[in-house]
Image (cartoon, coloured by chain):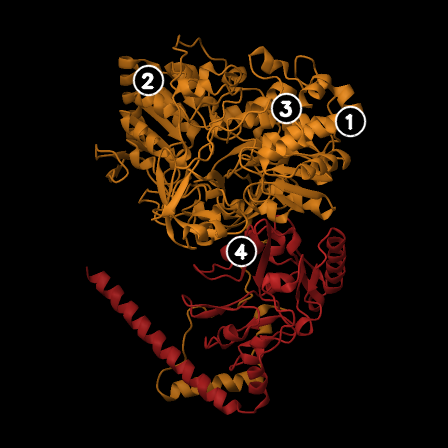
Chain colours: A red, B orange
Amino acid sequence: MSYENTAMLVDESLCTGCNACTVVCKQLYKLPHGVFRTKINRLSFGAYPEVKDYFDKRACFHCTDAACVKACPTGACQKDENGLTMINSSLCITCNWCVNNCPFNAVQPDRANGTIEKCTLCSGRIKKDQEPFCAEACTTRAVKFGTRGEMLQLGKKRVSELKSQGYTNAYLYGDYELNGLKVLTVLTDEPEKYNLPRNPKIPISLQIWKGIPFKPLVLAAGGAALAFNALHTRKVKNLQNKNKQNKGGE
Amino acid sequence: MSGRERFKLDRRDFIKTTVGAGLAAGVGLGVPKFVRAQEQDALPLNEESAKVVPSFCGVCSGGCAIQAYVQNGRVVHLKGNPHDQAATGRLCVKGYNTLETLYDPDRVKQPMKRTNPNKGENEDPKFVEISWEEAIETVAEKFNEIREEYGGHAISFFHRSHPFSERLGRAIGTPNFIAHQSTCFTTQEAAWHAMVTGSGKPWTYDLENTKYILSFGCDLLGKAKNMHMQNVTNALRKGAKLVVLDPYQSITASKAHEWIPIKPGTDLAFTLAMIHVITQEKLYDKEFVEKYTTGIEEVISFARRYTPEWAEELTDVPADVIRRIAREFAQTPPAHIPSHKRDAAGPNYVNSTKLAQSQVLLNALVGTIDRPGGAMLPRNPRLPGMDAIFPPPAFPDMVTKRIDGWDEEPIMHTYYRGNMATVADGILNEKPYPVKAALVRGYNTLTFPNAKRMTEAFKKLDFLVVCEIIPTELVQLADIVFPEPHFLETSSFANRGYHSMYPQLAIRLPVSETSLHNTKGFGSIILELADKMGLGRYFEGVSGGKFDDERLKAIGTSWEEFKQSPTGLWGDEQALEPREEFNTPSGKIELYATVFEKYGFDPLPTWQPKLEMPSEEYPFYFVINRPIVHKMAATQNNRIAHEISPENHAVMNADKAAEMGIKDGDEVIVKSKVNEVKLKARLIQGIRPDTIMIEHGFGHRSKALRLADGKGANDGDLIPDFSVEEFKKLRDPGAGACMTDVCLSIRKA
């Protein structure tokens, strides 16, 4: 399987919201309380008895045109050579601009560790020709992984099957959005029902931001933030050491 | 290419970093150190170097085969065994997440004895740690004292069937073994027993090949049993139609093509009208019915009175919908009504056994009993029991009357079961005699109907021994606590519990040589206890290892051989041979159940309403559901399950709540005739306006469960219990505990 040309397919019609993916991801990546790289939300529309519920597996879509990459002032958040959006935490100053600008709410600060968390599509595994953990663990096999061609074909087939079963609004999300998402999603209804924007866009503010060449300013701001972070880290460390010493003295 | 290389700094980055660092250095701070600066794509699991230990899951009775990945002495990940016909390489969320229970810092780690003689939910037991020797000796002495003074029957056992413990009970001379099944599935068991199997309910479904799945509150997707989720979603993939009748829009209902919010406790009327349509319109599978069943003529004349118009009145479902569903069910083969434990045919209502009966009948009418697309009778290897391997000496005579009246259940008493709905009354009123001690394993007070009263019953005992892995509410009432290992730390083997299309066993080996805590397996505890009680002669030569080995030898293998299995499994795939005969008096599926008739029960499922109807005082129906990440009341202290689902709610219809001035998140008091609980309201559209749903498993009150304590409330507090006399009056061959046959009121707190 060529790594560059891979994609994930999430079939919401077969997702039961069990969060097996969430659990396995949290366990393996040792994510602290409140931090998720993937999580399922249950959404509900309509009035009794015409109620429809939807399950939205939310994680980084690895957009081709990625708002987070455009937003990042230090270059920590960038595309790797294979199109995955990755955050290099040693460059990240946790300014949260990626968090605020993601059109999908799929990036999250991890305050306990002073980092930004988001799905990496288990890039280390993909390189070893293994599926991401969530795809391997999904009880109902609603999450699949393969070449983009295969996933698109399967996704389109599922959408036409769902349409013939009465899900007339069935939708394949991610083929064209933001020039293509690496995570494709089969929806049983229109994207809005899953809290997904029909036409996701990079915020205009970011487009302007990237257009103006004021890199020196960015670097100054980045430097200041790094300095603040270091100061803060040292303060915390000092406090911790003090506490340790105090405890040792008891 | 490695992750490290990929994040190699390019020149621009290098300059940026240098400048940043330079700026920082300029103000005299040095290069900052980040707490978590590792590459984000570093691999947390290395399959090549990790040790893989075969096991099978103990979270539910499905027993999915597991591959446990151990790195540096710690289990980091569980995978489903790809060679297991049930797991097919996957687990369910609860299976994956059981690691958090294994490593739960709140686990019971050491044998303990109580030093505070006062017992109660707000009493600190003031446990002190003791040795295993002292713990076992204390229990042996106390049991022997009680036995001498009050007789062996004054000692009771509360746990799932266990061969060693049952033998100890017979040696002591007690009939009092109380298990939970009358709160779980005896209603379905009775119907299958009488009509098809003579030996209980089959758990395997071939739903993957079903074209039309009709569920009566059977939340196969929301309960998250691995094999059921896989079966149903595979059927959906293949284009099967899924129709769900449920007062609450469960997860299965939310994935269904059609959700019909039927009035609680009236599913029987719906099925009777279906039988009416299918028999009057002659839509049934004539070949199957003629060849494999008896009683069709009786059914045809019986069902004549149950028109869809009659059922519409009761069920709140229009007659034309009932008619259409009946026709679709009969004309979309293979069609099936699956049923697993606490759905509408579980022991929820006084008419649940009859619902189970009519479901078996409908499945027989469309020919999906032990046929593709239907319920499959078990195909497990035949393993000898304890008495065949270790023949016991003669047991002493004992009192046969039981504290819970189970001995008087005409059909169900032949099963190792018991009645959690009557045992509190028996203990508190000392009827038919006083019970002074109990040994409890794996059950908690929250599990019992009228949990508060059961707590009083346990408090009344002179001596309570609890075997547990986490410090539950019952542990807080115990005199002696025996800590048990987590299942991943033990050895065993098991059938494919809920998906056995051919005989297959999975082996379980301990994930490490030493247990995390000072624990002992239940079998060993019982053997040592028997020895210390002076009852060692009943266990001559018995050990857990020998028992396993002898059972395996009976099917042509052995423990040593099984241990070497490269897949962790025993048994090759076999082609399915449909049964031609069934274990009933006639050898056929008895639509007219002569076994029920013989014991004076209704051979056909005549309409009967539920016990309690909404009144002015209690205007709401009560239904129970379970959050998908939790296993009953056992996982609320599990770190990640707690994070995803920390508490339960009183779930009600948003429009109805608005009428009553209740807002989402308001604290409310929910009350039944036995008790009241305080909860937060959660308002949704997907529930009938006359129904309140409460999720099970919450309301822990043990302070030692540091995450779960005080979160939500226990639905079991609202469920009534019975005296043996009251229970007998229900005349239910399935002896169901009527877990939701009670109505509720709700008001703002």
Task: Decide if residue B705 is on the left or right side of residue A187.
Answer: left
- Using the image, name the chain to which the residue with label 4 belongs: A
Amino acid under label 3?
Ile
Q: Give me the disc on residue B282.
A: 1
Tell me what residue is drawn at x 48 percent, y 38 percent: B621
Amino acid under label 4?
Thr
Q: Give me the disc on residue B154.
A: 2
Tell me what residue is drawn at x 44 percent, y 44 percent: B635
Q: SS of the residue at dot 4?
A: helix
Amino acid under label 1?
Lys
The residue that disc 3 covers is: B555
- Using the image, name the chain to which the residue with label 3 belongs: B
The residue that disc 4 covers is: A22
- Quarter of the image for the C terminus of chain A: give it: bottom left
Whether residue A165 is visible to the viewer of this picture, yes or no, is yes
- Label 2 neighbourhood size at 10 Å, few (<14), some (14-19), many (20+)? many
Q: Do labels 1 and 4 share a chain?
A: no
Q: Nearer the viewer, mark 1 or mark 2?
A: 1
Q: Are marks 4 and 2 on the same chain?
A: no
Task: Decide if residue A64 is on the left or right side of residue B443.
Answer: right
Tell which circle, 1 or 3, labels the residue nearer the N-terminal end.
1
- Using the image, name the chain to which the residue with label 2 belongs: B
Q: SS of the residue at dot 3?
A: loop
Q: Do labels 4 and 3 share a chain?
A: no
Labels 1 and 4 touching (C-beta < 8 A)? no
Tell which circle, 1 or 2, labels the residue nearer the N-terminal end.
2
**Most distant residue in the left direction:** A250
